[in-house]
Amino acid sequence: MIPYLDLHTINAPYEVDIKQALLDVVDSGWYLFGQQVAAFEQEWADYNGARFCVACANGLDALRLVLRAWIEMGYLKRGDGVIVPANTYIASILAVSDNGLVPIPVEPDPESYLIDPRKITQLLEDPESSPAYPVAKDVTIRAILPVHLYGQRCEMEAIDRLAAQHRLLVLQDSAQSHGIKAKGTCAWSFYPGKNLGALGDAGAVTTDDEALATVIRQLAFYGSERKYVHRFKGVNSRMDELQAAVLRIKLHDLDRANARRVAIANRFA
């Protein structure tokens, strides 16, 4: 039997560099909010062509933090609707419901299994058009959460046009799309099994919105804007220096590793 995902084999080419990087972090005596996290944030932002990157504890937190930030900034309010793919992983739904928002499922395109912009259009034009997922009359749709799945990119051009037309926010769940260099606001997971995987949990948000990045960073550190001054009721959601050091090593090889995955997949096609 061919193993589906052998993490030992995936990480083996980086073993020497990873061990040295971890030793360097341990020897530094600095394990949080250090040079490794700051460097990874800059490198991941640059790789994706984004102005800002905010590291956090995991991909679910990345989604939660963006939605919570939009609430704090006045762009969303609890009870608002967020369009999500009907076939996404539960984390996408939890991020919405945990913030007191309402997930509005939309069926995927039967060819790609990605959220279908045509069905989003139908829903926006007639919110009662989906008998399987009826939208309550007191719910106002304010955002779209497309999820890039199976190594494929959602039709973001069409989704962005719809968002602009209907004045909706867009948050991309990019947990399975490392390498697409997505524009806009994206939530990332670096769970070990991802294309860019840490040796534990880690996540990040990339965005071009400076105000959003600032609020997310504060929310992820107890709501603090400076020491002992807490602007929000925040949470503790941090990427540690060890995970950042590992991700920096693997990031430099991400394009080659993705190409290798594609080559292997094509052999089974």
Image (cartoon, rainbow, N blue to C red):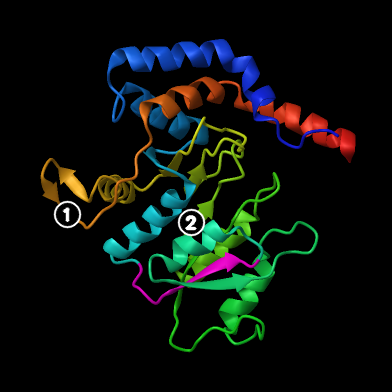
**Magenta-colored span:** 76-86
Circles 2 and 1, Cβ within 8 Å, touching? The answer is: no
Q: Quadrant of the N terminus?
A: top right
Q: Earlier in the sequence, mark 2 or mark 1?
A: 2
Q: Quadrant of residue 221?
A: top left
Looking at numbered disc 2 in the image, what kind of residue is underneath it?
A: Leu
Looking at numbered disc 1 in the image, what kind of residue is underneath it?
A: Arg
Q: Quadrant of residue 104?
A: bottom right
Q: Which residue is at 59% across, 61% downward?
A: 159
The answer to whether any part of residue 55 appears in the image is: yes
| Disc assigned to residue 231 | 1
Dot 1 falls on a residue whose secondary structure is: loop
Horizontal and vertical percent position of residue 42: 39, 29
Horizontal and vertical percent position of residue 5: 71, 35
On screen, residue 261 above or below 169: above
| Disc assigned to residue 171 | 2
Q: Is residue 81 magenta?
A: yes
As drawn, which residue projects farthest toward the left?
228
Q: How many marks?
A: 2
